[in-house]
Amino acid sequence: MKNILLIALALFFYQCKSSKTTFNGDFEIVDKAGHPLGWSIRTDNSGSYISEVDSNIKRSGKYSIRIEKVKEAYPFWAFNFPIETIYDVDSITLSGYIKTENVKSGFAALWARVDNASGKSISMDNMSQRGVKGTNDWKKVSLTIAYDSKNAAQLSVGGLLLRDGKAWFDQLEITANGKSIDKVKTIDREQLKVQSDTAFRSSSNIKDFQITPQRITNLKLTGQFWSFLKYHHPAIAKGEYNWDAELFRLLPSVISAKSNLELSKALETYLENLPTPPTCMDCKEISERPYLIKPDYGSLFDAKILQQSLIDKLKYVQANRNTESNFYVKLTGIGNPDFQVEKLYGHLSSPDVGYRLLSLYRYWAIINYYFPSRNLIGENWNEVLADAIPSFVNAKNNKEYALEVLKLVSRIKDSHAVLYGSNQALEEYKGKFALPIQLSFIQNKLLVIGIHSDEQNLKNHLSIGDEIIAINNIPVVQLNKQMLPYTSSSNYETQLRDIARSVLRSNERQIKLSINRNGKLLNYDAATGPLNLGYKNALFEKAVPFRVLKGNIGYVFPGKYKGDMLSEISKTFEDVKGIIIDMRCYPSAYMPYTFGNYIKDSQSPFLQVTRGSVAYPGSFFESPPFKNGQSNYIPDGSPKPFKGKVVVIVNADTQSQAEFTTMAFQSSPRVRVLGSTTSGADGDVSEINLPGGLTTMISGLGVYYPDGTAAQRAGVKIDYKVYPTIKGIKAGRDELMEKAITLLNKNN
């Protein structure tokens, strides 16, 4: 709940109108309607909470703020005072008084948050571990958060109530460096035009409309046009336009276009109102460099659809594009794209049709121009745009919109492309509760492979190896088909991994399981519990960082390994037959150049990446290869290199850093990889904000073996394909471990 509450608060009041008044912490300055100036105090639309000014119970003055839980629906409620003033301090303290009544399962608290320009929280505290519980008279509480004046765009403070009871809040005060916030030195920042254009902050002003074949063409070309200019036009790259707002200014004319000719005229008229880019002296030379992937402009230069005069103008922009920094995308030091300026619009609980199209276009543009594995998606990304338009336009509510986004991000086939945020509809779709059971698809059957808690007496009803054949009377085969389009993974085996993890989530407090146990059909109504219990991993729970197995074989579990253990490991493993590295986890330490050098006594390349380009959007070039292994110079104190055989065990849980590390290890001629298809998602991640408080990610670097073989989607190269079996699971065997031991014994 702590993490969920942090995420939810991070977007709960995002982009509320910032207060320009003195901090009204005692709520005594009110407008004609009796509303405290500067405060956003709203009653929950679902009817879960009442949030209002209280003139009867207060600590001082005339008013306090009361939050009261009245029925089940939403887990918490809060009120907020947003401040866009930037302060020249490094921390902020919020203090105040709280009175509570019957707060039993949750807590009442103050909260404070600092957001950057995109609305992302960069510092936050909600007193989740020290909130006020029970029934209490007025109690003073305080919190302090870090304040990054270089990146801060808005400070928000307030009070909250989680789960039940009543809470009153009074005499809130913000201080910094021992002074009231109103007396602290402030910083003036020059605003770019992109930041000062707030015309469409609350609505795109685009009304719902009917989809027709012509409008699909119009909207497809508009998406390509808007995306192209966003990353190519110098004026837009400099932040001279709020490009989100410009979409809403453009859309009415293209929606009303009755033909391709009218569409072309609408786009050309808009383009003519932008400044003509100055002549680019190096664009041609940049375009002629070697690239693994070159840009795809879709139908923008198709004379069968658009007029030649518009095409010529677009080609001029392409030939004289921005080649310097771009406000909307930056490349990090390692080369993956950073889109953090993109706004979340978390205040839009149900984005209108204009904002839904913005969401589609923003995501489509990022994938088209900055996803390094665009060539591995497996379908034409331009056609995906056309295919998604009707669904985004016709989404009737927040849930339908969130599911369309989930389906869209799943189409890029990237296991990093999860979707998260404070979108309530998305969380309700996923389910608020879970069973404390670990499932896995074994030989195409959904088996119980772990039981994490016996609070519900689960172990009397379930056994390891039980096959789940239906959930709430829906066959698993049918559930699998329903969930696949909404499960974002690089390959089918990883999709099954994620379905097995999420299929037992529910909004209900009970789930009906239909079980096949050795041919006998059983039914069991299991009580759900906290989400975290559903995501435990039996292998991780019992693992140790390293040990010597029977038969004198070393074992390392990177999920619990720490870098300072290497010296002890090298001594412990000095005489072992071989080493098993169990990479069915996420490494807790960076191992390619430390442990990697320990098992690899000569340098050689193990991986190379492709990076995108701000100067030539949509292109991706190869970087020099990564190398590891002992060099000719070995520093004093370095562990003695291990000369024996090594087996790395992998499966679908081997993802991202685990895959990178496996590739580093297997570049040693003495290392073999055993197991099943890995996640196929390597490369540092880049976050993408989408309207409605949604965030997703992409693998921001293309990852390849030195021979050019792609690791994205395919996963790491495997020498011995080994899968667990139903028989092995029932017997409690780890068949991959057994095979690894057999291989090491054969080689000695």
Image (spheres, rainbow, N blue to C red):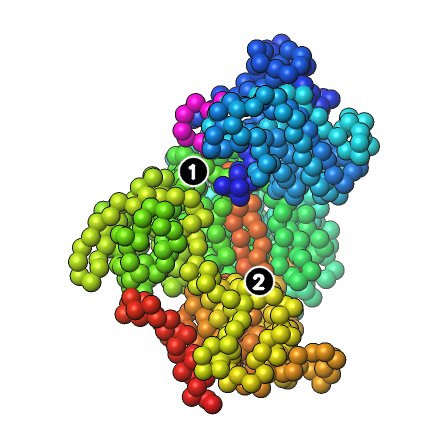
Which tag is nearer the camera, tag 1 or tag 2? 2
Q: Position of residue 369 (x, y in %)?
A: 57, 56
Q: In terms of sequence position, does the residue under pointer 1 or pointer 2 come before the other?
A: 1
Residue 480 is left or right of residue 106, and the answer is left
Q: Is residue 435 above or below residue 508?
A: below
- Disc 1 versus disc 2: distance between alpha carbons? 33 Å
Of residue 455 and residue 330, the one placed in the foreground of this image is: 455
Q: Residue at x 71, y 26 (%)?
A: 173
Read off the magenta span: 68-75
Q: Position of residue 313 (x, y in %)?
A: 62, 50
- The disc placed on residue 588 is 2
In this rendering, would 417 be left or right of 517?
Answer: right
Give the dominant element type of the magenta stretch: helix, strand or loop. Answer: loop
Contact check, label 1 and label 2, Cβ < 8 Å: no
Say whether residue 377 is magenta.
no
Q: Is residue 4 above or below residue 446?
A: above
Q: Residue furthest left?
A: 520
Most extreme residue toward the bottom is 748
